[in-house]
Image (cartoon, rainbow, N blue to C red):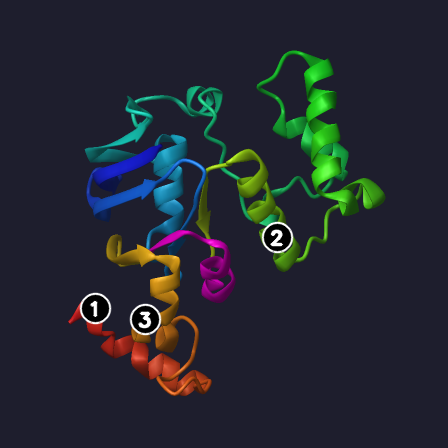
Amino acid sequence: MLALNNIEVVYDGVILVLRGVSLFAEEGCITTLLGANGAGKTTTLKAISGLLRSERGEVTKGTIELDGERLDRLPPHDVVKRGVTQVFEGRRVFENLTVEENLVAGAHTRSDFARVREGIGRVYDVFPPLKERRQPERRLVEEIFGIVRRLREEQRLTVLLVEQNAALALDIADHGYVMENGRIVLEGPAATLRQNSDIKEFYLGLNEAGARKSYRDVKHYKRRKRWLS
């Protein structure tokens, strides 16, 4: 459904951030993108959503396609109209607005207010705590992931999940990618990645015997990851 084909992203015409990134999010599946801070995950999402130009970035090579249609040449509002929506991190809401006001702001591309109210009602049905509080949300990560899984099962929602909590992400995902220094270094079914010794040691903090490693050990391992050798 969503395909990134060997894309490169450059900022300010000279800073190469993504290099030859290929990623495929199959219809009705949850695909997760893992990686440490600075790996290029956010840039990947901005490339898909068409938000790079606002930060003087651009896709200089490769293509981004949705059902075979190019997205990388479209402005952000046209990407949204084609059904691709980026859900930002929790801190990106308008702090001075209520939950409902934030939902109304998120529906600014719709001109039919009746449909906006209908959509807000669906959000409250899916996230009951929001309806109860109607104040800046305090959702638990586990609850969010459970709801995402349910939406995938009930509505065949296609999800590209970017999350630093690898254990939770791989628990609900069907397929996963690992990004380092702007490139994809590992991919496979989520169940396979969960059993990968490198993933266990670096992202889950476990050694091969299943014991949790200390922060010092994990930090040392970061300098000798086998997939970068």
Residue 62 drawn at (x, y percent): 19, 34
- In terms of secondary structure, where does tag 1 sit? helix
Q: Amino acid at mark 2?
A: Gly
* Residue at point 61%, 17% (across, down): 110
Q: Residue at x 40, y 70 (%)?
A: 203
Q: Looking at the picture, which amino acid does disc 1 mark?
A: Trp
Residue 128 image position (x, y, % from top left): 77, 44
What numbered label is drawn on residue 196? Answer: 3
- Kindly give the residue lying farthest to the right in the view shown: 132
Q: Quadrant of residue 67?
A: top left
Residue 98 location, quadrant? top right
Give the camera-side residue of 196 and 94: 196
Label 1 sits on residue: 227
Which residue type carries mark 3?
Asn
Figure check: 87 above or below 72: below
Q: Quadrant of the N terminus?
A: top left
CB-based contact (under 8 Å), mark 1 and mark 2: no
Looking at marks 1 and 3 on the same chain, the residue that comes earlier in the sequence is marked by 3
Q: CA distance from mark 1 to mark 3?
A: 11 Å
**Magenta residues?**
164-178
Label 1 and label 2: CA atoms lie apart by 31 Å
Mark number for residue 146?
A: 2
**What is the residue that sits farthest to the left in this orientation?**
229
- Label 3 – label 2 distance at C-alpha: 24 Å
